[in-house]
Amino acid sequence: MQNENNDICSPIANLPQLIEMQKVQLLLAEQRTALSIFRTGIAIFTIPLSVLTVLIATSKYYQIMDILYLIIPTAILLTGLVILAVWMIIRAMKSIVHIRLMIDKIKERDEFLKEFLKS
């Protein structure tokens, strides 16, 4: 009769491997969060582009000097949105790269994970 600790299906025998798998699952969850931040940054970046497209398309109906009191706050707001979007995108990209490096380190230590997580 085989001891429970030596059984390949035993949770106790595979505890280090299970811990490594849980670490990878946590990192993948963090990566999904970073990807959603990246997606949100891209969506925010499209808002100023859309507003500028509308302003350019309708520019023949107004003189900029006549509505300068509207253009300046709009330009400030759009600039702020672009800065926010770029910051979110850069932050998400740094996070994704860091997470991928951590997953690669875990894969180097565990042969099963190296085979299981080929990408």
Image (cartoon, grey):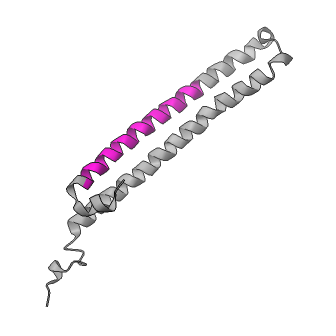
Is 10 left or right of 58, judged from the image as shown?
left
- Residue drawn at (75%, 21%) of the image: 56
The residue at the far right in this view is: 61
Residue 6, horizontal then vertical, whole percent: 15, 79
Q: Is residue 99 magenta?
A: yes
Q: Give the vertical position of 43 relative to 102 (above or below).
A: above
Residue 69, horizontal then vertical, whole percent: 74, 14
Residue 73, horizontal then vertical, whole percent: 67, 19
Viewport quadrant of the N terminus? bottom left
Is 110 left or right of 63, judged from the image as shown?
left
Is 93 left or right of 65, judged from the image as shown?
left
Q: Give the vertical position of 39 relative to 23 (above or below).
A: above
**Viewer-proximal residue among 36 and 117:** 117
Q: Is residue 96 magenta?
A: yes
- Residue drawn at (25%, 78%) of the image: 9
Q: Give the vertical position of 107 relative to 6 (above or below).
A: above
Q: Give the vertical position of 106 relative to 39 (above or below).
A: below
Magenta: predominant secondary structure element? helix
> Image quadrant of residue 93?
top left
> Image quadrant of residue 39?
top right
Magenta segment boundaries in residue numbering: 80-107
The residue at the far top in this view is: 65
